[in-house]
Image (cartoon, helix red, strand yellow):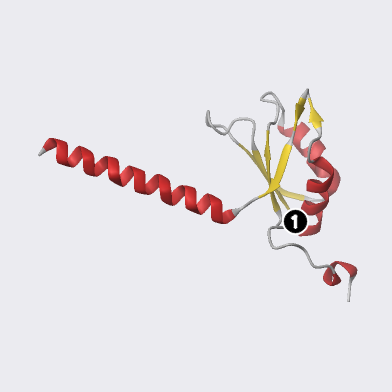
Amino acid sequence: MALAEQLRLPPEVNQIIYVRNLPLKITPEQLFEIFGKYGPIRQIRRGVASDTKGSAFVAYEDIFDAKNALDHLKGLQVAGKYLSVNYLQKDRITKKAEIRKAKQEIENLKKEFKST
């Protein structure tokens, strides 16, 4: 049994990390340089909307590479900004999407009743 198989990771650990407080002018090459030191990267997705700029999702090939990156990069200073690095919490994203959908439905109902 390999060492990686013997280790038990906390349930929140996964292959995708969520990074906030990135410099707005950081290039894709710089992102790959910073995060690629910890293992092969499957994908990096940067936030482009006004409320997601300065954030990114980094998906690693291996869960242990993601854990290593998070352990080393949390609080790293990049261009005068300290990075906030956490594991992707899929249930939080799903919950936010559900709330957004419910709010939109309420707004639609309000519009419908105003017009009648």
Q: Residue at x 74, y 34 (%)?
A: 83
Percent coordinates x, y for residue 19 in the rendering: 69, 40
Residue 51 vertical placement versus 91 (above, below):
above
User: Nearest the camera: 46 or 69?
Assistant: 69
Percent coordinates x, y for residue 31 in the rendering: 75, 35
| Residue farthest left in this picture | 116
Q: Quadrant of the N terminus?
A: bottom right
Sort mark 1 into few (<14), some (14-19) or many (20+) by Cα contacts within 10 Å.
Answer: some
Q: Is residue 32 left or right of residue 114?
A: right
In the picture of the structure, the residue carrying the numbered disc 1 is 61
Q: Residue at x 77, y 63 (%)?
A: 9
Dividing the picture into quadrants, the one containing residue 55 is top right
Q: Is residue 10 left or right of residue 7?
A: left
Q: Is residue 59 visible?
A: yes
Dividing the picture into quadrants, the one containing residue 75 is top right
Percent coordinates x, y for residue 4 in the rendering: 85, 66
